[in-house]
Image: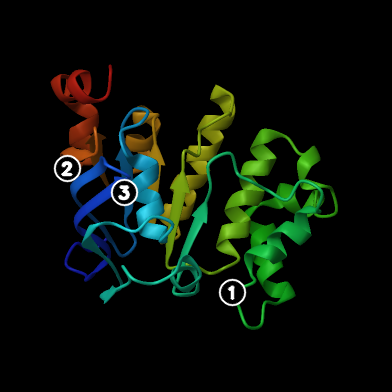
Amino acid sequence: MNSGDKPLLQLHGINTYYGQMHVLQDVELQVNQGELVALLGGNACGKSTTLKTILGLVTPKTGQVVFDGIDVTGLKPAQRIRGGIAVVPENRRLFGAMSVVENLKMGAYTQKNPSDTDLEVMYDLFPKLAERRNQLAGTLSGGEQQMVAVARALMAKPRLLLMDEPSMGLSPKLVEQSFDLIADLHARGVSMLVVEQNANMALSVADRGYVLQTGRVVLTGPAADLANDEELRRAYLGR
């Protein structure tokens, strides 16, 4: 990461409502080129709404979503995805009745000329998927499904990868493998925003972190500082 680079993603003064409920309150957030940022917090703190706001699934009442220097607040989700944002959704949401390779090809629908070379890149990154390429995605293990979900998102060649609760539903061993994968993608230069309740794992791989509490950013800083400050962890991360 070069913090001097122009930010890839910026949220400015985001206020998002569900009806009369003020869900996000003056949220400020930034992801730089090549950076891995963790967005942390408990249930109903606003993490998923932040992700939906970035994707355009929810429109803020006030504030701006700026991606690569362009205000995308008024753009539809499909336009943002074509612009270079991809998401690995919570619980992976694969097409269970389709094969692994069919799922991967679905991820490349925004590309004008997806090629077999793109698939081979994914198979090099995830050798297990090469073995399982013709297997129905719904019959894979949780860890393998996570690989498919990540590879499907990468097939879109995104400039920013959003990951929504990557540890959810996985055993402790698979959680560790999942974050090893996230660390590997980060080492390859993939810019990421990881939304996660498992603060220990997320901060172990992130450059920086933000902590949300009841829709407000109550804490932000280098991941190592957040991980090592016991008082802050007890207050905001439930340790």
Which amino acid lies under the numbered mark 3 shown in the image of this protein? Val
Q: Earlier in the sequence, mark 3 or mark 1?
A: 3
Q: Nearer the viewer, mark 3 or mark 1?
A: 1
For label 2, the SS is: strand
For label 1, the SS is: loop
**Quarter of the image with the N terminus in it:** bottom left
Q: Is residue 190 visible?
A: no
Q: Which mark is residue 221?
A: 2
Q: Which mark is residue 48?
A: none
User: Real-space Cα distance between discs 3 and 2?
Assistant: 10 Å
User: Real-space Cα distance between discs 1 and 2?
Assistant: 34 Å
Asked which quadrant contains residue 105, the reply is bottom right
Q: Residue at x 46, y 48 (%)?
A: 163
Q: Earlier in the sequence, mark 3 or mark 2?
A: 3
Estimate how packed mark 2 is, as few (under 14), some (14 to 19) or many (20 or more) residues with alpha carbons within 10 Å.
some
Asked if 59 appears above or below 212 in the picture, the reply is below
Which amino acid lies under the numbered mark 1 shown in the image of this protein? Thr
Asked if 213 appears above or below 193 in the picture, the reply is above
Judged left or right of residue 16, residue 84 is right
User: Real-space Cα distance between discs 3 and 1?
Assistant: 25 Å
Q: Which residue is mark 1?
A: 110
Which amino acid lies under the numbered mark 2 shown in the image of this protein? Gly
Q: Which residue is mark 3?
A: 37
Q: Position of residue 230 (x, y in %)?
A: 18, 20
Whether tag 1 and tag 2 are in contact, CB under 8 A, the answer is no
